[in-house]
Image (cartoon, grey):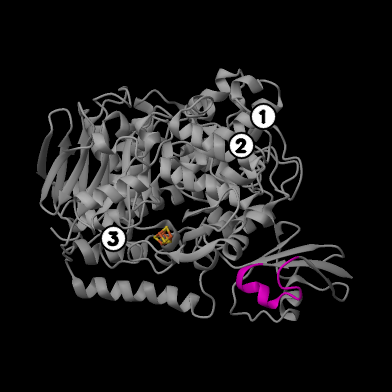
Amino acid sequence: MEVWIQAFANLKAYAPGGAGETLLSVPEGTTLQELLERLGIPPTVEVVALVNGKRAAAQTPLASGDRLTLFPPMEGG
Amino acid sequence: MYGWCGKILRVDLTHGRITPEALDPGTARDWIGGRGFGIHFLRKEVPPGCDPFGPQNKVVMATGPLTGTAAPTGARYVVTTRSPLTGAITCSNSGGYFPAELKKSGWDALIVEGVSPEPVYLWIDGERAELRPAAHLWGKTTHETDDLLRAETHAEARTAVIGPAGERRVRFAAIMNDRDRAAGRAGVGAVLGAKNLKGIAVRGEGEVALADPAAFKAANAKYRGRFKEKTRDNPPPLRLHGTAITVVGTQSHGVFPTRNFREGQFEGWEAIYGETLSRRFLVRPKACFSCPIACGRVTRVPEGPFQGEGEGPEYETVYALGSNCGVDDLAALTRANYLCNELGLDTISMGGAIACAMELFERGLLPEAEAGMPLRWGDGAALVELTRRTGLREGFGDRLAEGSLRLAARYGAPELAMVAKGLDFAGYDPRGEQGMGLAYATSPIGGSHMRGDPAYFELLGVPVAADPHSWEDKPPLIAKWQDVFCVIDAAGLCVFFSVRYLVEPDLWIRPVGITELLNGATGAGYSPEEVERIGERIFNAERLYLLASGFSAKDDTLPPRILREPMPSGPAKGMVCRLEEMLGPYYRVRGWSPEGVPTRETLASLGLL
Ligand code: SF4
């Protein structure tokens, strides 16, 4: 199945397309956590991960066409 | 005294008298400083019904015990007064270098009262202070005024001034310090203008005396160490890209206000967010006094019709002058931001008024002949020109200068002003961020995000993440965050650092690090519980002042768009803000009656009877 990924700030380094939204092929049933591991994001790097604009638990299986947004926790706005 | 200077400067403009006063040690301990001093003196000295532009209104400009110390982000001061935009209280917060300089000159706070018969400015040179004629400065921009004041006083003096907007009583005029930092919200600059006070220049070479230098140093090293540890491998996003990186959080959650809060996602977001700003216009990041983050932006628009240089835009400006007006032209909105800084305008309310005018125009309620031009969503050139006209109250700018609520009411549609208690919202749509709705509705100054900002936990994952769509769990959380923000604003710290590094990393933030720093500086021996109580005391005192000014529970509300029009698209599609469900439990948690009035027991427990 394929999912869309877009990453920001320091997390761009781990996203296949760098900046911009990229389509990535992953095995059926891949969970959010497995995907983060697959991208090579070390567990020490803090990530806010959204699936279709909503926060999802690490064990959530992804569905084809899901849109992932990854950004670091931020101090302010 | 330690931490505190122990002195307040009273400036009576009517009689041209300047009087030093001792700061009562009990007052210092009970209210900490900054925002606490602001509401303490306002309640004591300013009748709640008085005209914000009249001689009875006063302006309290107060630092905290950590302002001017080596504490991380000990950079800030708070301006408290009655607001000409909302008719209620406002307290507006700013950093830069002026607040630390004021503290180092030996003063904890200034109380500005009366009205000067002629334009004047205040020059504080350490212990000495004098009022000087300012007729030659009237009409000058904030940058010109800063240059002239430093030329006339001391090359290294720090200034806080108003621009043409404050002189003309634009109801959301700001006080600009260090040229580009703003105490922006709800018209504090217009109040100085009404008092004929063009600005303040200060020079201070003293050091803030610390009660326990070793304990202070240890606390400072500990919390700066936390920051260094977290940012060792990855510099803070705010330094890399400024607060405009926050667009990522709001856009992806579908709460990035677009075209006067009609939608929550902006198709042009990539053109205006922090990383694009860094790539196109960033010259260098800039830090406030004693700040390790450096979220400030020195920028330059190198060419084209909007060429210029200055500071900004911040996230709130990118929302207010960008997405909320449908503008994806970063050069135009940056130029409009420069104009706001130079004329002395709050970018949030400027954007709120323009977005409201654009919707009135689109609906045919505001004729083009009156507006002086077509007001189309996304028109960057119109945005810049309307900003200029507002600062000078020229043509239709005179209407915009009254603020979005008065503007919308004038054209028969007050519900189109996206405000709480008359103050324009910050850049978060409460339909997809329920806690923010409650925070806007119950903030003592109106629609501000900085009076207990739930975006941290609802959107940005700080200190930990919570669900932005749930409302049942929000009332006690919002009350808790509002109280801790009072403490941050009283201590003289910046929220951006404090909320991540000076609290326990838990949703129920506890001001442990702030307490350690306060104790090292002042020797007050506060417990974290006592500091939390002070936060609650400040919040309740502001509530009492608000009620005394004629506000009641019916004003703890949000526009119909937010309460009844479901979000049309995006992750928050179909949602409205469940304010009704949250308010009752919130009043109960606060110890307020169902009418939103603090009970006698609550007041007694906070020492407010
Ligand atoms: S984080 Fe930004 S606003 Fe806060 S003190 Fe530092 S530079 Fe100033």
For residue B374, the mark is 1
Tell me how far mark 3 sits from mark 2, CA to CA.
Answer: 53 Å
Mark 3 Cα shell of 10 Å, populated few (<14), some (14-19), many (≥20): some
Chain to which the residue tagged by mark 2 belongs: B
Mark 2 Cα shell of 10 Å, populated few (<14), some (14-19), many (≥20): some
Question: Which residues are drawn in magenta?
Answer: A8-20
**Of the residues shown, which amino acid type is indicated by label 2?**
Ala
Q: Which residue carries the number 2 mark? A: B382
Q: Could you tell me residue B563's position as x and y percent?
A: 64, 33
Q: Quadrant of the C terminus of chain B?
A: top left
Q: Could you tell me residue B524's position as x and y percent?
A: 20, 59
Q: Is residue B33 visible?
A: no
Q: Which residue carries the number 3 mark? A: B527
Q: Are callouts 3 and 2 both on one chain?
A: yes
Element type at mark 2:
helix
> In this picture, is B494 found above or below B415?
below
Label 2 close to label 1 by CB (< 8 Å): yes
The residue closer to the viewer here, B564 or B403, is B403
**Of the residues shown, which amino acid type is indicated by label 3?**
Ser
**Of the residues shown, which amino acid type is indicated by label 1?**
Pro
> Residue B194, located in which quarter of the rendered image?
top left
Q: Identify which residue is drawn at 25% across, 29% down.
A: B46
Tell me how far mark 1 sits from mark 3, CA to CA.
Answer: 58 Å
Element type at mark 1:
loop
Q: Is residue A13 magenta?
A: yes
> In this picture, is B455 found above or below B326?
below
> Residue B323, located in which quarter of the rendered image?
top right
Q: Could you tell me residue A62's position as x and y percent?
A: 81, 67
